[in-house]
Image (cartoon, rainbow, N blue to C red):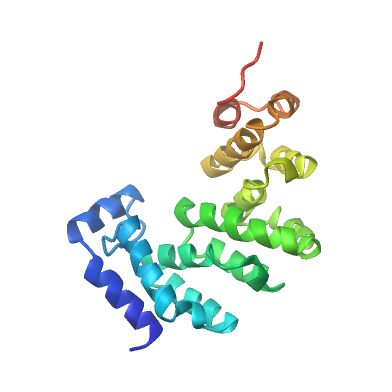
Amino acid sequence: MDALTQIKSLLLGAGNPMRATQMANYLRNQFSFYGVMSTPRKEILNTLKKDWLDGLSEADKRSLVRLLWVEEQRECQLLALEWMMKWNVKSLLPEDIDFFEWLIINKSWWDTVDGIAPNLVGKYAKKFPVQMKHTLQQWENHESFWIRRSCLIFQLRYRSETDLSQLQYFIGKFKPEREFFIQKAIGWSLREVSKWNPSWVARVVEEERLTGLAKREACKYIYFT
């Protein structure tokens, strides 16, 4: 039994048709599901990692992720993402940014993009800052709003290491967009910074004249006098 077939067989065996319908409804019926919740899915992943998954070469790991990513059932992408989030930063390769971009723009929705951007792209950016600088210059004008959203949220885990001038630049560039997921990301990125630098966030909200969803999200933990 090949790797992909084994993974799909395990997910199918753990699936629940009733739960599958509920999970599909939650994501607006954009994807099909086996009906495997987070806990049993992670148990399957841990078993696979222990048995053979982590023994694959770096090239084979990425090839398997691509195979999982084009599968119909959403659990295949979610299991692949959870696996990648456990990869050691030392295993990241300079060319992985193209791989991450492919993952972001295929089968795109918040449940994958919001894991890829801060947990994979964010780690990559720290390891390969020069490559990331060039990538962001391309991404800021990318046709996919999911890529543009990633420009706003890849630093979510950085805390005091956040490049605030870069973040404000992207906020200023993207704030005219009416796309819900862009406005949400503007607010989310600022809300995270407000946990350790509320005064900066308050200033940016005023300077950029943020309104609506972006402002509400940004100001969740701060108060204006």
Which quadrant holds residue 200? Answer: top right
- Give how far across and how far down residue 50 sits, in percent: 42, 75
Tell me: 62 left or right of 11.
right
Count the numbered circles shown: 0
Q: In this view, does 30 lie above or below 203?
A: below
Most distant residue in the left direction: 18
Instruction: Kindly indicate the quadrant of the structure image that contains residue 121.
Output: bottom right
The answer to which of 106 and 166 lies nearer the viewer is 166
- Residue placed at 64% from the left, 35% from the top? 190
| Residue toward you, 112 or 90 | 90
As drawn, the residue found furthest toward the bottom would be 1
In this view, which residue lies farthest toward the front?
50
Q: Which quadrant of the rendered structure holds the N terminus?
A: bottom left
Answer left or right for 217 relative to 201: left
Position in image of residue 72 (x %, y %)? 35, 69
At x 66%, y 67%, the residue is: 97
Q: Is residue 104 visible?
A: yes
157 and 168: which is toward the camera: 157
Quadrant where the C terminus sits is: top right
User: Picture coordinates of residue 210 (x, y %)?
Assistant: 65, 28
**Percent position of residue 197, x then y:** 70, 30
Q: Give above or below for 78 relative to 221.
A: below
Residue beneath the point at 79% across and 40% down: 165
> Is any atom of residue 162 visible in this view?
no
Q: Say which residue appears at 42% left-offset and 62% top-offset.
A: 78
Query: As displayed, is residue 164 above or below residue 59?
Result: above
Horizontal relation, residue 19 to residue 100: left or right: left
Q: Nearer the viewer, residue 155 or 213?
A: 155
